[in-house]
């Protein structure tokens, strides 16, 4: 997947991220603003999850979002 989440999709994607990782604040997500590396770092810092697992979940979320947009 791309290293950044497109600006138009970020607001929708941000909601999905907050649903999954609820400890992340709006301010933290605003700082990340679609940058995957920053987002992964935030999740690792808050939850201690492995980078590969986070990346896989983000890929799955993006894929689902893309499929929804195609309909």
Image (spheres, rainbow, N blue to C red):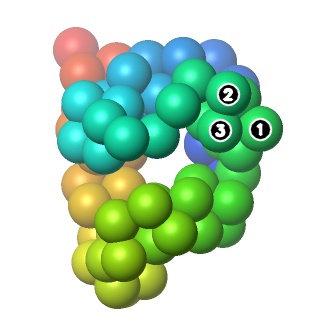
Identify the image quadrant of the C terminus.
top left
Is residue 7 depicted above or below 38 in this figure?
above
Residue nearer the viewer, 14 or 24: 24
Which residue sits at x=34%, y=66%? 47
Which residue is identified by label 2? 27
Q: Position of residue 55 (x, y in %)?
A: 40, 71
How many other residues sit within 10 Å of disc 3, few (<14), some (14-19) or many (≥20)?
few
User: Percent x, y for residue 5?
Assistant: 61, 42
- Residue at horizontal 70%, vertical 51%? 35
Q: Is residue 2 visible?
A: no
**Spatial CA span between label 1 and label 3:** 5 Å
Name the residue that disc number 1 marks. Answer: 31
Q: Residue furthest right?
A: 31
Circles 2, 3 touching at the beta carbon (< 8 Å): yes
Question: Which is nearer the eye, 1 or 29?
Answer: 29
Q: Quadrant of residue 65?
A: top left
Q: Determine contact: label 1, label 3, CB under 8 Å.
A: yes
Q: Secondary structure at mark 2?
A: helix
Side (left or right) of 47 relative to 10: left
Tell me the element at label 3: helix
Disc ID at residue 28:
3
Judge whether 38 appears above or below 10 on screen: below
Tell me whether circle 2 and circle 1 mark residues in contact (CB < 8 Å).
yes
């Amino acid at each position: 997947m791309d290293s950044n989440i497109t600006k138009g999709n970020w607001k929708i994607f941000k909601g999905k991220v907050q649903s999954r990782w609820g400890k992340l604040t709006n301010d933290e997500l605003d700082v990340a603003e679609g940058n995957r590396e920053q987002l992964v770092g935030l999740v690792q810092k808050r939850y201690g999850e492995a980078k590969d697992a986070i990346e896989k979940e983000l890929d799955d979320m993006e894929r689902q979002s893309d499929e929804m947009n195609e309909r």
